[in-house]
Structure formats: structure tokens, C-alpha cells
Amino acid sequence: MGMLRDIKPLLPELIETAKRAGKEILEVYEKEISVQYKDDRSPLTEADRRSHRVITKGLKSLTPDVPVLSEEGSGIDYTERSQWQEFWLVDPLDGTKEFIKRNGEFTINIALIRNQKPVFGLILIPVKEVIYYGGPLVGGLYKCSTREDVKDYLSEHYRVKSEGNKRSKAITVVGSRSHGSERLTTFVEKLKSRYKDLNFVSAGSALKFCLVAEGRADLYPRFGPTMEWDTGAGHALLLSAGSTILRADTLTELTYNKESLRNPDFIVIGKALSEDIISFFHE
């Protein structure tokens, strides 16, 4: 299987595919939401299924030789997956709990994984009508509105200039809206002993990656279960912004297409805070 030579010509259709999926999600969002539960008790709605169908169909039409691994179609045996050098990694509705709560904090996540690393990511926030996209294959972090009829998605007009390149005295830590934990509380309290001026904010889904990538948050610690499709697109955006996502146990970068698709605990670190936080872990 050959790898994609250049993702840039595909950007318009990739973004249109995500926009179509976003419309499907919002159609369900505006009605009474019926919820089912998977074996692991995680919620599933018609919006998850409709978005999955739109994105999978769009990606297979656009890149028929590139496999697709989606949360709603993840039962692909590792013996097959282990042969993949490149594949699309999709969460058709990240933040289903936030979707059910109707707080708007849910996203569509599409990532391209190459040799176990994210090289492109796209995150769409349907309620806000905003798309972030970027990664090593496009050489930057970009942001635009879903209402725009954009022809040149790599225009400097859409490039995000991160606010987080300069270290400030105050730091902002972002945590999960629906998945807090005692370990997170303990970690934040320890941080306060070092950073006296610390703000903690909560956000749902992959919005937390967007906040760090843009420089509006400095740190996102996650101590709890996540899957590869939760992080792939956000990870690519972070790389575009000079930020990183590290395993909490080894402080090495997350990798993808593991035999188990579950992620270890991790820490997302903004560019300005990177060296300082790593030294904090070694204390």
C-alpha cells in the first residue's frame, strides 16, 4: 500500500466531509436524543452513527487505498492493522456525554497516522462552526469557520499564531468536563505549590487540545481511560504548534496503532511550558 504523497490537495474535500458530518450531528442535536450504551457503558447516539457513515464514505472515496479506523468501526483485528503503515483514525463524535448534556462541547476528530505517528489532524466543533486543522504534513496550525467558502485552506489568513510561545507568570490548566479524578485533583494541588498563579478550567472532548495548541491553556493532564481516536487529531495539531503530548509514566510521546487501542495516562504540554513541566516531573 503506497502512502499519500501530499495531503494539501485533499484538504478542501476533507474539510467538506467533516462539515457534512457536522450537519448530520446537528440535525440529531436539535431533536430529542435517544441514547444506547455499548458493552463498556459508554453512550452511543444516532449522531455517532450518522457521522461515522458520512466520514467513512468520504475518506474511502477520497483515498481508497488508505484504511479507516473509526471508533464506530473499530473491530479490526490487530493482525490486519499491524500491516498498516498509514491509516485514517476517526472519532465521529468525540464527547458524546457533552452532546447528551447539550452543552456544545463535542467535536469531530479526523487524523492521518503514519508509522504510528500523527501527521495530519482535523477537529471540527459543530456548535461553534469552527474547524482546526494542521500537522507535519501541512506545516502549521490553521483555523477557519465552517460558514466560509474557502478555496485556499493554507492561506496565511487562516494560520493560527499561538499565544503561548512566551512564558507568563500565570498558567492555565485545562481538565476534562466529565472525567475528573482524585488523581487529577492531587496533581493540580501539587502544581499549585510551584505555580502560585494557576487557573483551572474544564472543557469537553478534543476542545482541550485546541486550547493548548492555540496557547489559551498551558497544560492538559489526563489520568483516566482514553482511546487512540480521542487523541490522534489533537496530537497532530499540537505538533503544529510546537507543543507535545507525553505518556505520564515514561514522558515519551504517545504512539498509535498499538495492539491495544487504549492510551496510557498522558500530559499535554504547551510550548512555553515544556521544559519547566518536564523538570517538575523529575523533582
Image (cartoon, rainbow, N blue to C red):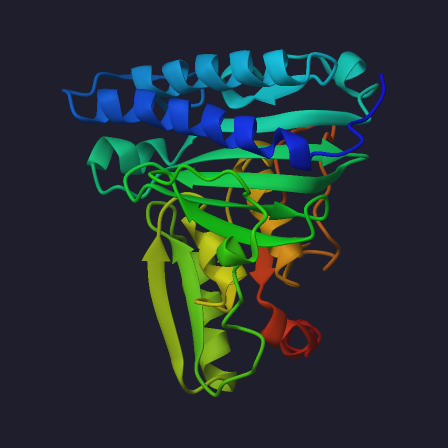
Quadrant (top left/top right/bottom left/bottom right) for the C terminus = bottom right
Q: Quadrant of residue 172?
A: bottom left
Position of the N terminus, as image quadrant, is top right
Along the line of sight, which residue is nearer the eye, 179 or 153? 153
Q: Residue at x 72, y 48 (%)?
A: 136
Q: Position of residue 213 (x, y in %)?
A: 53, 59
Spot occupied by residue 170 in the image (x, y as percentages of width and height): 44, 83
Q: Is residue 31 left or right of residue 283?
A: left
Query: Percent x, y for residue 226?
Result: 53, 39
Identify the residue at the far front of this view: 151
Using residue 29 as the reference point, say whether residue 8 is left or right of it: right
Q: Nearer the viewer, residue 95 or 118?
A: 118
Up/down of 40 relative to 262, above or below: above
- Which residue is more in the foreground, 31 or 101? 31
Tell me the residue at 84%/19% (across/down).
Answer: 83
Name the outermost residue toward the left.
32
Q: Residue at x 54, y 26 (%)?
A: 13
Residue 265 seen in the current view:
no
Question: Nearest the camera: 98 or 3?
Answer: 3
| Above-or-below relation of 172 to 168 | above
Q: Quadrant of residue 184?
A: bottom left
The correct choice, above or below, for 271 with respect to 160 in the image is below
Q: Is residue 148 left or right of residue 233?
A: left
The image shows a total of numbered marks equal to 0
Residue ID at (61%, 34%): 111
Instruction: Confirm whether residue 19 shows in the render.
Output: yes
Residue 199 rendering spot, x and y as whole percentages: 36, 74
